Image: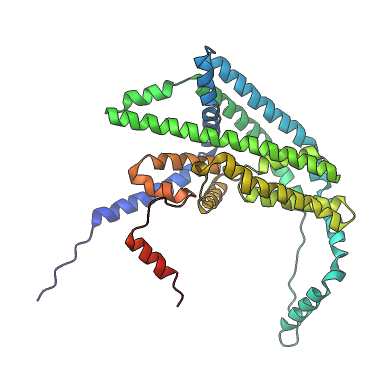
């Protein structure tokens, strides 16, 4: 008896292939067009952050161009203030980085007596690595510290950074001053009334959610920066204002920013203080303040609807950092918030929105789901 021939679903394979090629092309385009896309994206986020406030002022007969000019002036003053605060201390750190590294190494050497067991274990491991009576020696080449290498990069890209900031503010100003022009154009080009309603609901929800997220996170980070500055001032750390500004900026980067801030604080505390025990207070206080913010303040103010899956956040941080470097790290979470809100409004993308959300499903699990959960929890 002849077996029926199995038909291959070629359209599905072709669709998957085209989707893969599209994603690959999109990644290449994002990398290639960074200088164009990044200021447009940053300007868009700044515009939608202040857009609800501009709309509220417009209802009180304040011209939109005047409100947009005021908010852009505030953003520009904040950028200039940060540049003024960070320029001197960062330049001093770059110049003194070799001395800091030498001091840090010499102080850590004083603790070798406390780790005698670790040293003996290292000696045993070295003996175990001996092959045929000959010790395999690995050559270690010490090059100049990273700060000196980064200094050239910073000076080389300074004009590019300034141009990006200026272009971002110009784009944000025009987007804020344009009012609801783009929304009206969107309604006009869509064919059906249902499509118009869905599009407006999506854009208004994206505007509201991203604006709420960015404003609340900015306020939280500002309070955290003030708390870190006051705490470091009480501990006697040098340049406490710089530490407050650094905590404010780094806290826009989930997880990675906190670890980076604690590590830098530990390094400078060991360099600045004679006692290692007292130096541990600086990174410890930074970790405590950041833990309070992360575990209590942010969930209370942001609410569950703006909480994102930690796995999705880490994936987004990895991807955008790989594509755009530090700038991508800063915009990864706002992009993720916008994508989540967009997916929540479309049934075909509801699964992606559910994955990005941190909350557990509120629906009662079906019998099949309960069986799967019970089977997965049974120990062999």
Residue 150: image location, x then y, percent: 72, 46
Toward the viewer: 54 or 380?
380
Residue 300: image location, x then y, percent: 58, 42
Q: Is residue 134 left or right of residue 353?
A: right
Residue 113: which quarter of the image?
bottom right
Is residue 274 at all visible to an observer of this figure? yes
- Tell me the residue at 54%/17% (across/down): 57
- Tell me the residue at 40%/34% (across/down): 202
Residue 341: image location, x then y, percent: 44, 39
Viewport quadrant of the N terminus: bottom left
Viewport quadrant of the C terminus: bottom left
Is residue 157 at all visible to an observer of this figure? no
Residue 344: image location, x then y, percent: 40, 42
Where 238 falls versus 374 (above or below)?
above
Q: Is residue 224 left or right of residue 19?
A: right
Q: Is residue 99 left or right of residue 58?
A: right
Toward the viewer: 198 or 163?
198
């Amino acid at each position: 008896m002849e077996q029926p021939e199995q038909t291959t679903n070629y359209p599905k394979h072709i669709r998957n292939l085209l989707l893969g090629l599209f994603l690959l092309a999109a990644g290449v385009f994002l990398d290639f067009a960074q200088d164009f896309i990044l200021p447009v994206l940053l300007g868009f986020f700044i515009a939608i952050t202040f857009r609800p406030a501009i709309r509220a002022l417009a209802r009180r007969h304040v011209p939109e161009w005047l409100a947009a000019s005021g908010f852009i002036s505030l953003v520009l003053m904040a950028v200039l203030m940060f540049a003024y605060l960070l320029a001197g201390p960062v330049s001093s750190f770059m110049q003194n980085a070799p001395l800091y590294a030498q001091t840090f190494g010499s102080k850590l050497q004083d603790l070798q007596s406390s780790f005698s067991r670790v040293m003996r274990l290292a000696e045993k491991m070295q003996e175990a690595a001996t092959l045929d009576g000959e010790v395999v020696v690995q050559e270690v080449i010490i090059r100049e510290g990273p700060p000196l290498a980064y200094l050239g990069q910073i000076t080389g890209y300074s004009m590019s950074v300034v141009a990006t900031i200026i272009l971002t503010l110009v784009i944000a100003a025009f987007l804020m001053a344009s009012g609801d022009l783009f929304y009206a154009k969107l309604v006009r080009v869509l064919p059906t009334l249902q499509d118009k309603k869905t599009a407006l609901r999506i854009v208004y929800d994206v505007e509201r959610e991203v604006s709420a997220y960015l404003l609340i996170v900015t306020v939280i980070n500002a309070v955290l920066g003030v708390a870190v500055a006051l705490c470091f001032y009480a501990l006697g750390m040098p340049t406490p204002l710089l530490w407050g500004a650094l905590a404010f900026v780094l806290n826009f980067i989930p997880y990675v920013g906190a670890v980076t801030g604690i590590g830098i604080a530990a390094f400078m505390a060991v360099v600045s203080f004679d006692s290692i025990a007292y130096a541990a207070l600086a990174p410890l206080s930074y970790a405590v303040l950041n833990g309070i913010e992360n575990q209590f303040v942010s969930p209370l103010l942001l609410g569950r609807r703006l909480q994102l899956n930690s796995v999705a956040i880490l994936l987004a941080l990895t991807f955008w950092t790989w594509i755009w470097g530090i700038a991508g790290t800063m915009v990864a979470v706002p992009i993720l918030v916008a994508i989540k809100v967009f997916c929540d409004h479309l049934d075909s993308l509801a699964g992606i929105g559910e994955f990005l959300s941190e909350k557990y499903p509120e629906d009662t699990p079906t019998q099949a789901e309960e069986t799967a959960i019970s089977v997965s929890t049974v120990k062999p």
